[in-house]
């Protein structure tokens, strides 16, 4: 099957297939030649045999998508210790039909931790294509000197209240950094690089959509939060070998100081890999 989108001149009297046409886009789903193609010249008659450069392969051989919308029971793996709570709430808002609520109460050992992840701790390393991770989250209350929490979301291997050994992720850690700004981080073999984003975490009723993007070569990672791009890219200690593989998605939230309940809400997460080489 194919779908053709034709770009026409402003004059509606111009017929398809003549020189006044501006070109066309063809989306093909047949097994022999799937993808999205562009024809930039319309000097020839007819629209058969469209040729051009493949812009995107829309088959699973080209890409991988892992996600959870939290609309029912978790398809992700949840890791809990006493003091941590995880619950799925439906119909929180009209456009958020499933929300996961993670809560932490105390800061004794790992009894303050919640972790949501796919059950594939060594599934991804970077350098084989563009990788994006997206999560919509809402911190109910920001950290202070009395009750301090840490949020680590992205693709990493940490559990409990530990820092990642390998991964590419976003961090909120008031106790360590002394402010409410996110840090963009990469870790390889336990060595970490954390760069400023200039973007602050918000609380209460404000949802923040976080998008992490790693380039195809695995040499530069960036972040946007609600469409605002972080001030710096992370370029060091990116895991680019199988020995440093990490989880395709992990959402960690834990307590550092205090015993009052603190919560974070997650609407969804999604990890997408667009492979450089078709598998």
Image (tube, rainbow, N blue to C red):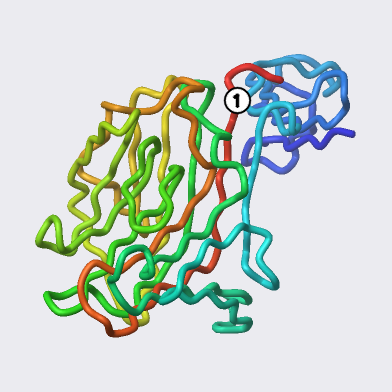
Binning the other alpha carbons within 10 Å of mark 1 as few (below 14), some (14 to 19) or many (20 upward) gives some
Query: Would residue 112 be found to the left or right of residue 72 on screen?
Result: left
- Asked where in the image residue 68 lies, by quadrant, the reply is bottom right
x and y percent of residue 225 in the render? 34, 56
x and y percent of residue 218 in the render? 41, 24
Image quadrant where one finds the C terminus:
top right
x and y percent of residue 211 in the render? 42, 49
Q: Say above or below: 218 vs 190.
A: above
The residue positioned 43% from the left and 48% from the top of the image is 154
Query: Would residue 24 be found to the left or right of residue 220 on screen?
Result: right
Q: How many marks?
A: 1
x and y percent of residue 274 in the render? 59, 30
Query: In the rendered image, which residue does mark 1 sit on?
Result: 275
Q: Say above or below: 173 vs 4.
A: below
Q: Secondary structure at mark 1?
A: strand
Residues 166 and 45: in front is 166
The residue positioned 24% from the left and 55% from the top of the image is 182
The residue positioned 62% from the left and 68% from the top of the image is 70
Image quadrant where one finds the N terminus:
top right
Q: Say above or below: 220 vs 223.
A: above
The residue positioned 72% from the left and 35% from the top of the image is 6
Residues 77 and 169: in front is 77
Residues 134 and 81: in front is 81
């Amino acid at each position: 099957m194919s779908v053709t989108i034709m770009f026409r001149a402003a004059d509606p009297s111009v017929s398809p297939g003549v020189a006044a046409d501006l070109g066309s886009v063809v989306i093909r789903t047949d097994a022999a030649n799937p993808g999205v193609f562009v024809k930039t010249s319309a000097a020839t008659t007819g629209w058969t045999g469209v040729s051009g450069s493949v812009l995107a392969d829309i088959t699973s051989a080209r890409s991988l998508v892992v996600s959870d919308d939290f609309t029912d029971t978790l398809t992700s793996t949840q890791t809990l210790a006493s003091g941590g709570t995880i619950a799925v709430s439906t119909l929180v808002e009209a456009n958020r039909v499933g929300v996961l609520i993670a809560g932490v109460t105390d800061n004794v050992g790992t009894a303050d931790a919640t972790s949501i992840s796919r059950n594939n701790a060594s599934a991804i390393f970077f350098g084989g294509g563009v990788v994006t991770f997206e999560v919509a989250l809402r911190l109910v209350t920001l950290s202070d000197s009395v009750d301090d929490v840490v949020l680590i979301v992205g693709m990493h291997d940490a559990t409990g209240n530990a820092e990642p050994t390998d991964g590419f992720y976003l961090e909120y850690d008031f106790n360590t950094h002394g402010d409410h700004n996110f840090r963009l981080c990469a870790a390889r073999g336990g060595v970490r690089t954390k760069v400023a984003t200039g973007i602050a975490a918000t609380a209460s009723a404000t949802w923040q959509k976080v998008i992490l993007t790693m380039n195809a070569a695995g040499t530069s990672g960036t972040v946007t939060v609600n469409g605002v791009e972080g001030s710096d890219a992370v370029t060091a200690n990116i895991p680019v070998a199988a020995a440093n593989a990490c989880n395709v998605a992990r959402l960690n939230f834990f307590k550092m100081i205090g015993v009052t309940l603190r919560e974070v809400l997650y609407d969804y997460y999604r990890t997408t890999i667009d492979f450089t080489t078709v598998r």
